Image (cartoon, rainbow, N blue to C red):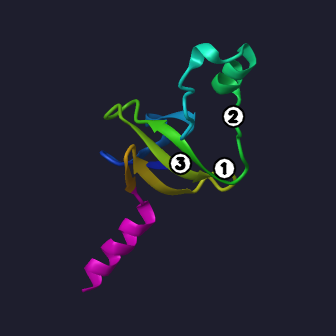
Amino acid sequence: MLLIECPWCGPRAEVEFTCGGEAEIARPLDTDALSDKEWGDYLFMRHNPRGVHKEQWLHAQGCRRWFMATRDTVTYEIQSYEKFGASHHASNEKDQAKGSAQR
């Protein structure tokens, strides 16, 4: 089971979350000016890369907030978490906590 760290609630089981797909997709400003193909590409076409990329996640069975996770699609390892508008790096916080505990 994948353990996902909600930036607000802390570590929780994967079953509590819903993946919202690729993150950082910019909505076209003037949607009326788009052709049907361009609108369809925006709605449905995603990169789905092999390796590291950012995804949107919803803590559906918890705080019901959206956040971003940088995840490796090959190993399933989540490298960092971000609230929208702020950075929340899981590995950096763990390193800082270890350093504080050793002092």
Q: Residue at x 33, y 73 (%)?
A: 96
Mark-to-mark CA distance, 3 and 1: 12 Å
In this rendering, would 59 be left or right of 33?
A: left
Is label 3 or label 1 in front? 1
Q: Residue at x 24, y 86 (%)?
A: 103
Q: Are marks 3 and 2 in contact (CB under 8 Å)?
A: no
Residue 35: quadrant of the picture: top right
Q: Which residues are magenta?
A: 88-103
Say which label, 3 or 2, has the lower sequence index: 3
Q: Which residue is mark 2?
A: 46
Mark-to-mark CA distance, 1 and 2: 14 Å
Q: Are marks 3 and 1 in contact (CB under 8 Å)?
A: no
Question: What amino acid is found at the position of numbered circle 1 in the picture?
Answer: Thr
Q: Which residue is mark 3?
A: 2
Q: Residue at x 31, y 34 (%)?
A: 63
Secondary element at image label 3: loop
**Can you give x and y, in whole percent of width and height, for residue 14 in the image?**
49, 41
